[in-house]
Amino acid sequence: VNPLLVLCAAGCVSWLLRVTFIDLFPARNLPPWIRTALGAGGPAAIAALIVTDLTRTVPHGEPLPAVLAAMAAASAITLRFQNLGLTAAAGMAVYWLVSLVIG
Amino acid sequence: MIHHQNAPRPDPPGWVDRAALHDVSPVLIGLAPFAMVLGVAMRDADISTPTGMIGSLVVYAGSAQLAAVALMKSGAGIVSIMVAVALINARFVMYGAALEPRFRSQPAWFRWLAPHFLVDQSYILADSRTDLGNPQRFRRYWLTMAAAIGVVWLSAIGLTLTIGDFLPETPLTFAPIAILVGILVPKLHYKEARQAAIAAGLATLCGASLPPGGGLLLGVVVGAFAPTLIARRSA
């Protein structure tokens, strides 16, 4: 199969999913309880992405103590400064340091 | 609002939304390593640079594209590949539903074309802001964010396809998680957000052995509906 055709088809499928509740069946027609639930989608998506990332990387050599320490540092920096750039820098620095220490 | 203490100044008239650039900049750090993984996978599958670049722009969803490339390499048929892509990207349906009120008052071209740039990062950032009620403001915010993500995403993929890995693996591998933690933690101030995050985390963990994208989809759906179900039970 031509890779470009496959990727274009994948793009069409993805686009259809994206516009489903925006244009095809607008979400304003959904029952109110579903629309209420959608408000919690943000934190749910972020938590799911974090766990997905961890379940993908930790069993394949990512050092768990370094990950946990870096997550704690990132949380603390976020609470103190509410700055994503600083959070990312602190998380990466702690991850790197702990990885070095535990070898 | 994500950044309370570092809120950018009001935007001058023009195309670029300064707040969008401010919000998306740290996220871009985490995109490059993932784009490289995808670039390497496409190189291994003998996909040419132009095909890889066009495909990445058309799909605009890393996990699904990675699965599609791996399945292509293994000789899977197009139906299997499309089913995998649909399963992995099924969460976009929910993201679209959540952002629909922001798209509702937009011109038709924007409502049909701009959702193409709906990905985890753009959904999370747009959903976190409470000051995007003005349609023109949302349009500018969305397009600025999409352009920034697109430029970094495609540049990193293009460079990897052309010259191979160009970034050290550590500590950049942790950047995506650090950024997600940075976005999640301020939201946990609210009980419903805590319930959603805990339920999503546990459900994702339970679904870790599901096919690619299954655990993530399960986590997002369970997490989103958990606060509503808990409130109904308590009532």
Image (spheres, coloured by chain):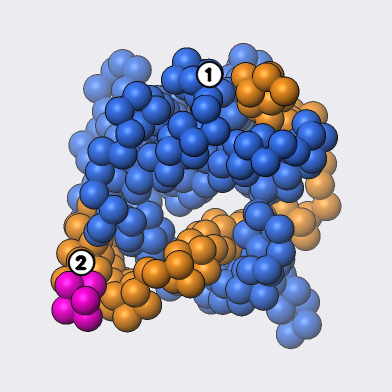
Q: Which residue is mark 1?
A: B51
Image coordinates of residue A3 in percent, x first then y, are 63, 23
Q: Quadrant of the N terminus of chain A?
A: top right
Image coordinates of residue B24 in percent, x first then y, are 34, 41
**Magenta span main SS:** helix
Query: Who's the residue at 71% across and 64% down the image?
Result: B210
Magenta segment includes A102? yes
Image coordinates of residue B204 in percent, x first then y, are 62, 68
Q: Which residue is mark 2?
A: A96
Report, in whole angstroms, how far the alpha carbon at label 2 lies from the one at label 1. 35 Å
Of badges 2 and 1, the one in the foreground is 1
Relative side of A10 to B15, left or right: right
Relative side of B155 to B191, left or right: left
Query: Who's the residue at 71% across and 79% down the image?
Result: B230
Q: Colour of chain B?
A: blue
SS type, badge 1:
helix
Query: Who's the residue at 25% across and 22% down the image?
Result: B12
Magenta segment includes B40? no
Query: Who's the residue at 54% across and 33% down the image?
Result: B45
Q: Is residue B64 visible?
A: no
Front residue (pair B212, B45): B45
- What range of the chain is rendered magenta? A98-103
- What chain letter is assigned to the residue under label 2? A
- What chain letter is assigned to the residue under label 1? B
Q: Colour of chain A?
A: orange
Based on the displayed image, in which of its 4 quarters is residue B164 positioned?
A: top left
Q: Quadrant of the C terminus of chain A?
A: bottom left
